[in-house]
Every structure is written in C-alpha cells, then in structure tokens.
Amino acid sequence: MNFLNRVSKSKSILKSSNCINYCTTAIPTQKQNYSTKNENTTPPIKNDLFTPNTFQSIVGYMNKPFEGKQSEYSQTHHSVLNMTLDQLIEMYKNRKVVDLSHVPTLDPQDVFVNGELKLAEVDVFGFDYDYTLANYSDQVQHLIYDLATSYLVDEQNYPAELKNLKYDSFAIRGLHFDMNHGLLMKLDFLNNIQPGAIYHGRKSLTKEQVIEKYGSMQLKKYYCENFLKPMSDIFCLPEACLISNTIQYLTEHNLSFEPRIIYEDVTKAVGKVHLGGGLHDQIIENLPLYLNKHPLLGDFLLKLKKAGKKLFLLTNNSYYYANHGMKYLLNDQLGDEYTDWTDLFDVIITQCDKPSFFGKGRPFRLFDPSSQRLDWREVSEFTPKKVYVGGSLKKFTEISKWRGRSVMYFGDHLFSDLVEPSLREGWKTVSIIKELETEVAIQNSPKYREQLADLLQLEDVIRRCQFFKGEKKDLFLEKLKQERYQKRIALKEPFNPNFGSIFRTHSNPTSFALSIQRYGDLYTSKIENFTSYPLNYVFYPSRNYLPHEFKLN
C-alpha cells in the first residue's frame, strides 16, 4: 500500500531500495559516503551507470539521433553496467532471501491520510449508521444473500435450485459488473482489467478471451461510464455473489439470459430486502449475532461531546431500526452523564435517501417516534433529541449553519457518503473500510513481505535483462516472466484467491483505491481508531512519490 498515504509511527513496509539485496556486490543499493578531501576522486562503485567515468560517454550518446541511440544503447547498455548476461543470470540464481526483520510493520488500526487535516478546525462530526457506527458481523452478508435469493425465486420466478447455492467470500468490494457481457471484474485506476480477476459467473476468463471481447485489457472511459456498474460498499458482496451464482447456474443449464436483466433483478431483490424484506426485523431480533460491539465507540463520542463538538446522525435507515442498534451499541457506555444515545447527538436525520440527499433532496419532516407520525409543518430549526426525516444538504446547511471544512463526515459508501458532500459542500470525509485491518495484517506477515521482496528483485532483473540480445537472453527473459506471473498470483491469493486486494492490482492502485484517495481525506477500519488521537491533532500525509522521483528512506 505504498501508493496510499498514512499516519503512523512506523514507515512503509517495503521500499524498493531495501528489497534489492543481491548476494553479489555488482549492483549497489545504498548511497555511499565518499571522502570530500579530493573532489576529483571517483566514487568506488564498480557498476553504477552514472559514475564520472561514464558521464561523458552518456552525454555524447544523448546527442545522437534516435535510431543511433536505440542501436547503440541496446548493444552497449550491459557494458555500461559492466555486467555480462551470464553475470546477471548468476546473480539472480544466487540471490539471497532479504532480511526484513528491521523493517517496521504497519498498525492495522491506524488512521491513514490522503490530505492534511487539522482536527482543531473541525467543529461538527457527522456519522452514517451502516458499517460506520454499526459494525456488522459477516452473518449479515449471509442473511442478505438468503433473503434476496428467496425473493428472486418466489417473486421473480427464477429457478428454485438457486436456493441451494450459498453465499461465500467469492467477491471483494470495489469490483465492476459489465451489464453488456455479464462479467464481474477488477479494474486499476487506469481502467485496466487485472489479468485473472474477471469472471463470467464463477469462471475466470483468460487474457485472450478478454482481448477478444474488449480489444485490449484496457477499457475505454465511455464504455466504463455506460456499461459498468461499480460495487463499492460491503452490502454489494452478497449482491455480487448472487449475480455470479445466478449467471453460473443459467450458463451451466444452457438457459439464455440478458446480463442487464440479471443485474437489475438481483439489485431489486437486495433493495427489497433492505427496505421491507425482513432484513432489519431479523437483525433486531438477534442483535448480538449481527452487530459487533466495541467499548471504545462510546469513549470517542463522549470525548467529542465533552469537547463541545456538534454531532449528527445522517442515515438512510428508519429511526425504528437505527434506534434499536444504537441502544444496543451505546447505552451501556454512556456513564452517569447521559441516559440514552440520543443525548449525544445534536441532530438526528433518518430515511434521508442518500445520495439524493446531497442533490435535490426533499423537505425535512419532523418525526414523532411515539406516534410514528410525520409533522406537516416546515422545519426551520433542529432541536436535540428530535428526529427528522428526508431533507437535503442545501437545507441542512441553511438550518444548521454548519458549513464546509468545519464539518467532517464518516461513512463507508464511497458514492453515497463521500463523493457528494466533498464536492458540493467541501466537507472533510473519512472512509470506513472494514477490510483494511485484514489487508494490513496480511502485508505485515513475514511470508508476504519476503514474497514481495523477491518479486521486486525479479522485476529489477527483468528490466536489466532487456538490454541484452540473443537467444540465451530470450530464453532467460521468458523464464523470468513466467516466474513473475507465479509470484504475482502468490501475492494475490492471501487477500482473495479470485480478485486479490481491494486496494491494488498486481502493480497499480485499483479504481476503488484511487476514489478513496480522491474523495476521502482520511480512511481507517473503524471509527474507534480515532479515540487515541487528541482533538488538536494534525494528520499529515506522507510524501507520495511519482515514478520519476528519488525515494528517500
């Protein structure tokens, strides 16, 4: 995750310069300390490309026409490196396992930084409910899947055998579904399809099959905007699994179908489950099974309240549902000062219909929980412990007078929670990404670190090998490429054997990761991770290096 900025006492897991640790001394990886007594002394580096002895020849080379450069450089670059192909092969064969014991690990519960943020400037803290204040267990995904499958079979006349197919961890967050071809895929930030991470049903497509359909491994922007549907939140996981299982079943039984219809029907089924299909009732009936309590949630909210900060809840859920969950999560953490979770919040807004709330929206309505009725009168002010329904960002700002960068909003859904408030009103945003703890823990494992270091060494040899010519070089290079392919697969599988990490493809940040960088000031695995930070803390981003920039440890 070196492409994502972070706040931590430790530094990045790996720097490429730390990972090149060959057994020979032919390629130095650390900057040497040279004596300054004699400025004309040549630094004692045998094979550095840019030593003073080679500088003049390189300048002369750069002044030649392109064709001359190409011919000469392809023939002599290995000489400039003072290394033969046999030496390069021997160097790679005898490479040592890199000692990474001195390299710090990351804290899985850290807060990671995309843009500088001063907590002292934040006066108002807003929160979504699902997967933000409420941290659901994995049992919720199984429940959503089962209820949505039943709706497809019972209400949409899909084959009853679909009920025999169960939810599993097939998909990850941040995928895209192609409604034209019925393919579920993982894209990087340049819309390149990750090889081996594109599926029709549960069957992976080869690179050749992908190119046959799209013409290349990179999708055009127009195609992405018109045919791809992003699956950005955790609630999309059962949806993606159900789409894939349905397509797989229909394909295996030679039943013709239109991918767009499958997508629309499954999306409708999942929506029905959320709105009135029994999901909320079943969760309320067994809160300990479906909600994970965390003792620090109350501590963090109380800390904000005691510091005079304003708090608001902004959720698409009904008050009835959110109230049951919040009582379970918070009411035993309030101490002696407060009796109910509603005492902590200055404004409570339910059924707000995000992301429409951030656009045109609706008028606010006052809701009476005891009578379950809406008041007809215009809402001109917000009163603590009162409950409001609907609304819009524009009206919310007018009534509350809470504006711009003084507001920080926590949410899990990229497009419903982060994009619009960031763009329209300039709110600071925090993305809650539950999977982050698992991803960082995998990166911290000794096996993963060793495999990554080995891959980086291999890729360095591949770059050098290309400057040689001949059949021996071609055979060696092909062998290296095959090894690289296998090592990439080995690094992908610990995250998810089908799609890998939600944050990166083999080399690049994913489309999901880029959006988090663009629209989230901070990101972390759960709200409680903020508890230890003082409220005058400044989150500084780490330097984000470009490919041409020198990386300092």
Image (tube, rainbow, N blue to C red):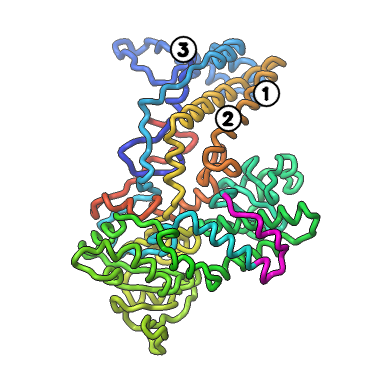
Q: Identify residue for label 2.
A: 487
Residue 241's x, y, as percent?
A: 61, 54
Question: In the structure shown, which secondary structural element does the residue marked by tag 2 occupy?
Answer: helix
**Precedes in sequence: disc 2 or disc 1:** 1
**Precedes in sequence: disc 3 or disc 1:** 3
Question: In the structure shown, which secondary structural element does the residue marked by tag 1 occupy?
Answer: helix
What is the C-alpha distance between the residues marked 3 and 2? 25 Å
Residue 44's x, y, as percent?
A: 41, 10
Q: Quadrant of the C terminus?
A: top left
Front one among 202 and 400: 202
Question: In the structure shown, which secondary structural element does the residue marked by tag 3 occupy?
Answer: loop
Left or right, 245 with reference to 518: right
Q: Is residue 426 magenta?
A: no
Q: Identify residue for label 1.
A: 478
Image disc number at residue 43: none
Q: Is residue 161 magenta?
A: yes
- On screen, 516 above or below 463? below
Start and end of the magenta stretch?
152-168
Q: What's the amino acid at mark 1?
A: Glu
Residue 63 seen: no
Q: What's the amino acid at mark 3?
A: Thr
- On screen, 325 above or below 11? below
Q: Identify residue for label 3.
A: 25
